[in-house]
Image (cartoon, rainbow, N blue to C red):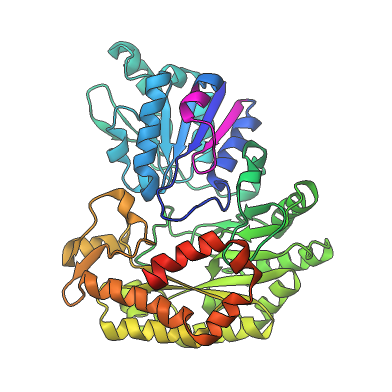
Amino acid sequence: MKALLISPKTNLPIETRTSPSLGLAYLGAVSERQGHTVRIYDGDVEDTSLEKVLRGFDPDLVGITANTIQIKSAWRDAALVKSVADVPVVLGGPHPTVLPAESAERPEVDIVVRGEGEVTWEELCQWRTFVSLSRTTANDERRGAISGLQSVPGISYQTPDGQVHHNPDRPVIKDLDSLPLPAYHLFKMDSYTNLQPTVDHIEGPSYPILTSRGCPYRCTYCSQIGPRRWRMRSAENVVAEWRWLVRDLGAAEIGVLDDSFNINRQRVLDICDLLIKEDLTHVPWIMINGIRANLAATELLGRMRQAGCIRSAFGVESGNQEILDSVIGKQLTLEQVRAAFKAAKEVGMETIGFFMIGLPGETEETMDETIRFAIELDPVVANFSMATPFPGTEMSRIVKEKGRLLIKDYDDFAFFEGRASFEMDGMKAELVERKWKEAHRRFYLRPSRVMRTLLKKETWLDLPRTVQVAWRTVVG
């Protein structure tokens, strides 16, 4: 069987060619493990039209992944698939997981996969009857195909009578070590930049790695699609992939994508000790999504730095403790954040801080506190985003009950645009947008920061992107 996996083009104001989709890399790997022929199409890097790929590859099954800002592109791609070849279309990812009926009702989508997709995708590929499923199939034949779907956990689909049926949830994968290595050979790796192009310039390929899944915390803004359960790969399994990335694929940089990398302190220490033992520390690695500041002691950060970690992000979000506690549910104190940034600097690790402007219940003063806190911490990069109530989050529920959503289109959920996505009593859009721009000006236009930026080679190596980002945030 031939399977085509699609990552739709992302509608963002800046280029997003930093890394391949790790989710599709895993799906491609499990498909190949079953003996199927696989083609991956990444809309952000492809120079060939999807229609041409469909006609040339002639797939038997198509899988599409989508987050909220990709979902409209995903539906368009699904409709194109149906117009070219009447083959089953499976849609998965964060957005379809939280709103499965929305996509299952669409004529161009046959199956919606909720949550983790590897095992479900394997079962759908194995189920030969499924490949004959079609909106144009006669009702009696379609009814027979649908009856087979009832045994597949974790999917939603439309029955012949027009009703959307949700099968029971699929249990999460307990043994993450059982997953195959991601199928990076299915991507055009030369088309991607390094993982953080505005911070450094890497000569050679950059690869992401996921060493754990899930998160025991549940911040109100987070669109984490899985249950509140953290699962980890063993240190030995992680380092085996690390060794493969460095020695077989020639990785020049590795980015850890975990939501909660340092939940288990001893596992992190074990990973670092193995990296040192295996002589893999010469390839720099970075923490893309950050680590928990309250679990980032000097010993841990020091060992990470010794093992080759050059930079870590921290999810700070707010400089106001009440906002952290009552609005976000961060389970973090400002003093713990201060201690983590201090420890990182002591061991020679660069830092990135994630901050939010315009959280529910904020005032101009609380937003000022966040800006001042960012300046105090002085990370290499302060990433200021506007609070955005993504579907399925607790923040979305709060805004619907107590505020007013300003965005009507999924494309507008991109939080780099400088437009507030909602208003609440005492917090108007104009105030949030003004403070967001002010945050960038006050942080980045300090004389010390301007000089530091001008002295960095990355500023000049990626000058068009630097100017574009600066115009949208500091100047625009």
Left or right: where 300 falls relative to 219:
right
**Left-right relation of 318 to 106:** right
> Does 136 appear above or below 194?
above
- Compared to 206, does 41 lie above or below? above
The reply to whether residue 216 is visible in this rendering is no
Q: Is residue 145 visible?
A: yes
Is 102 displayed left or right of 187 in the figure?
Answer: left
Asked whether 245 or 120 is in front, the reply is 245
- In the picture, residue 143 is in which quadrant? top left
Magenta residues (range): 36-54
Q: Residue at x 80, y 51 (%)?
A: 247
User: Residue 361: x percent and y percent?
Assistant: 24, 76
Where, quadrant-wise, is the N terminus in this rendering? Answer: top right
Q: Residue at x 28, y 14 (%)?
A: 139
Q: Position of residue 352 (x, y in %)?
A: 54, 73
**Who is closer to the viewer here, 104 or 4?**
4
Is residue 38 rendered magenta in the image? yes
